[in-house]
Image (tube, rainbow, N blue to C red):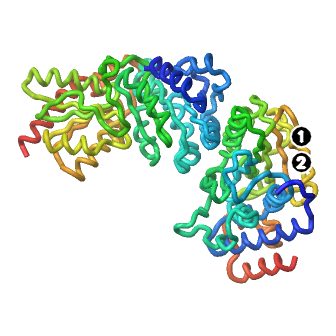
């Protein structure tokens, strides 16, 4: 996904001279290295000092540029949260954060570099938009949309590759508008990022078991597509959310608020249950910590049972 | 706002007015009066001593010099100076910290009233200043950026991240002014978290460093004008000041860091400022 990000950033930078790349000494990992090569005067490595990095980004944004900040959310959000809150969020400055290697994609590196709380942290910064592309096609569109959006954006990326969901030119993308990637009337699975592909796999399994699942790619975790959520609740009667993130304070929690307010239905939440993870492959971690395809299938069946039992 | 030699007597009168404003604002709505008082001459010289180029009726003028109040708790002093510089009506100062007014307890970025940066959590202004200087360079603009920090504020690691980066990027349009009033909230800075050798620290980070009496208007003006001619490295002016300067009993008592004089104290403070 980082290569897709890097290519998309270059496209945007070629078209718009106000785009600058600010790096926390990770450009060879995050996909920003292309900027360093092609636009050296618009690339700045601020070194391993995330708080200063965000302050510098705010200065650029206030001076009319569009800074993309590249780092790992595990380092950036925690280290520079004060600066994000004050310098970027309170003033609503036009800073774009790339959250590279997010979720559990750092795998064997261990829990310190994983970011399983980024939706919760950025969700607590009111003006921020949170974009979570589910494949490379969408990543390119998301980078474009982020650059055009007036205001701060958090763009989640991953170290690894995500299975292709959308063909070239076949990915609708509007900030705040979820994509229905599978129609179905028995339940709805609302997912984002890596988990959108997982949700589609689960839906295939469920279909064999006689259950038709609607799958919504909720690529914009903030602001949520309320309309899509309410329609899903009304039309299917059961909702499962799935995210590569803590269940507490994540996509599922935010969806539940909407469902609770507008049209309460049984819900189940697939994600990480209030714990840090450990070194392992992404597949191993998903299986051990409960956010694999099998977990989505099981939760779906429970949600459907709950609606019948009500 | 630049070019005319400053009339020191006029600057002294202005400084007195600013202190009276600060006393009114903080006594009524709370705040940090003694941290404001130590910065008054610095602000007066910047805005009225021919240092900053700005247009109060065109606050977003792209060529303007930027002043960044990193020690955000000195907001009342800055609001007073901005009002007197023409950004808004001085009558507005009594809307400080009141609901619906833009004059937040600690500055929130709002160019219309002359506030360049949000501050209040310390240590952040120098980074913003560096970003602004780099953006100016990229945009082929010539303006300067001045950042006022507190002394306690220099305990924040981010200040030194910015210092290191500013030197690395040879940000010679960046001037940091430290309001070295020797006290932080809990007490004398040497006792709580010593900064010395302070000038040496800035020099070690590659900055050009000068020192000045932070209440000597003439000396401040000379030093700041000279620093603007330094090339190749950012500059730090360590301004030796007195917390609470202007009111005798506030100068002696650092607990006025976070409380304003009230009742009889307020009257005494008023009298000293009006007659002193």
Q: Are marks 1 and 2 in contact (CB under 8 Å)?
A: yes
Q: Which mark is residue B225?
A: 2
Residue located 91% across and 49% down the image: B223
Residue B235 in sight here: yes
Residue B124: x and y in percent read: 65, 45
Q: Locate residue A142 relative to residue B15 in the image: left or right.
A: left
Q: Nearer the viewer, residue B204 or B40?
A: B40
Q: Locate residue A52 relative to residue A186 in the image: left or right.
A: right
Q: Which mark is residue B229?
A: 1
* Residue A215 higher or lower than B132, as above or below: above
Q: Which quarter of the figure is the N terminus of chain B placed in?
A: bottom right
Distance of mark 1 from mark 2, alpha carbons? 7 Å
Pinpoint the chain carrying mark 2.
Answer: B
Residue B51: x and y in percent read: 84, 52
Residue located 50% across and 43% down the image: A151
Pinpoint the chain carrying mark 1.
Answer: B
Bin the neighbour count of mark 1 within 10 Å (Cα to Cα): few under 14, some 14-19, many 20 and up.
few
Residue B164: x and y in percent read: 74, 33
Residue located 74% across and 61% down the image: B35
Q: Which mark is residue B103?
A: none
Whether labels 1 and 2 belong to a single chain: the reply is yes
């Amino acid at each position: 996904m980082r290569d897709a990000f890097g290519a998309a950033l270059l496209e945007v930078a070629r078209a718009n001279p106000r785009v600058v790349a600010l790096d926390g000494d990770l450009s060879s990992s995050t996909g920003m290295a292309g900027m360093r090569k092609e636009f050296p005067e618009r690339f700045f490595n601020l070194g391993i000092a995330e708080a200063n990095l965000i302050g510098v980004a705010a200065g650029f944004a206030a001076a009319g540029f569009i800074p993309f900040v590249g780092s790992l959310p595990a380092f950036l959000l925690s280290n520079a949260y004060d600066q994000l809150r004050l310098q970027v969020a309170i003033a609503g400055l036009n800073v774009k954060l790339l959250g590279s290697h997010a979720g559990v994609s750092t795998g064997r590196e261990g829990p310190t570099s994983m970011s399983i709380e980024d939706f919760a942290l950025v969700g607590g910064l009111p003006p921020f938009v949170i974009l979570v592309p589910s494949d490379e096609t969408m990543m390119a569109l998301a980078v474009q949309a982020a650059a055009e959006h007036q205001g701060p954006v958090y763009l989640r990326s991953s170290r690894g590759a995500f299975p292709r969901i959308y063909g070239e030119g076949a990915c609708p993308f509007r900030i705040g508008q979820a994509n229905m990637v599978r129609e179905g009337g028995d339940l709805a699975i609302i997912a984002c990022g890596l988990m959108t592909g997982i949700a589609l796999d689960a839906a295939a399994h469920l279909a064999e078991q006689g259950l038709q699942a609607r799958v919504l790619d909720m690529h914009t975790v903030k602001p949520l597509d309320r309309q899509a959520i309410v329609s899903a609740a009304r039309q299917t009667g059961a909702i499962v959310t799935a995210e590569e993130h803590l269940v507490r304070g994540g996509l599922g929690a935010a969806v539940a608020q909407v469902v609770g307010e507008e049209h309460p239905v049984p819900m189940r939440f697939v994600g990480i249950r209030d714990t840090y993870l450990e070194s392992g492959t992404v597949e191993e971690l998903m299986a051990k910590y409960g956010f694999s395809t099998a977990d989505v299938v099981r939760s779906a069946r429970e949600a459907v049972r709950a609606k019948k039992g009500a | 706002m630049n070019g005319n030699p400053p009339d020191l007597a006029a600057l002294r009168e202005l400084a007195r007015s600013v202190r009276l404003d600060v006393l009114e604002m903080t006594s009524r709505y709370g705040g940090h009066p003694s941290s404001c008082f130590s910065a008054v001459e610095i602000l007066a010289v910047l805005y009225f001593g021919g240092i900053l180029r700005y247009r109060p009726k065109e606050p977003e003028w792209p060529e303007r010099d930027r002043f960044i109040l990193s020690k955000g708790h000195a907001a009342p002093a800055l609001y007073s100076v901005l009002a007197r510089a023409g950004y808004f009506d001085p009558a507005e100062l009594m809307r400080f910290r009141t609901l619906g007014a833009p004059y937040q307890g600690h500055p929130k970025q709002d160019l219309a009233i002359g506030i360049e940066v949000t501050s209040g959590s310390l240590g952040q202004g120098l980074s913003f200043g560096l970003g602004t200087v780099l953006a100016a360079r990229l945009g082929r603009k010539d303006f300067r950026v001045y950042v006022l920090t507190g002394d306690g504020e220099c305990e924040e690691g981010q200040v030194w991240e910015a210092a290191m980066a500013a030197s690395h990027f040879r940000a010679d349009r960046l001037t940091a002014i430290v309001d070295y009033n020797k006290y932080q909230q809990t007490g004398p800075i040497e006792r709580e978290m010593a900064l010395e050798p302070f000038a040496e620290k800035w020099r070690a980070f590659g900055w050009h460093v000068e020192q000045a009496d932070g209440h000597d208007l003439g000396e401040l003006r000379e030093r700041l004008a000279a620093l603007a001619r330094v090339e190749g490295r950012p500059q730090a002016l360590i301004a030796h000041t007195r917390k609470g300067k202007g009111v005798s009993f506030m100068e002696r008592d650092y607990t006025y860091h976070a409380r304003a004089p009230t009742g009889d104290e307020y009257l005494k403070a008023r009298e000293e400022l009006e007659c002193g």
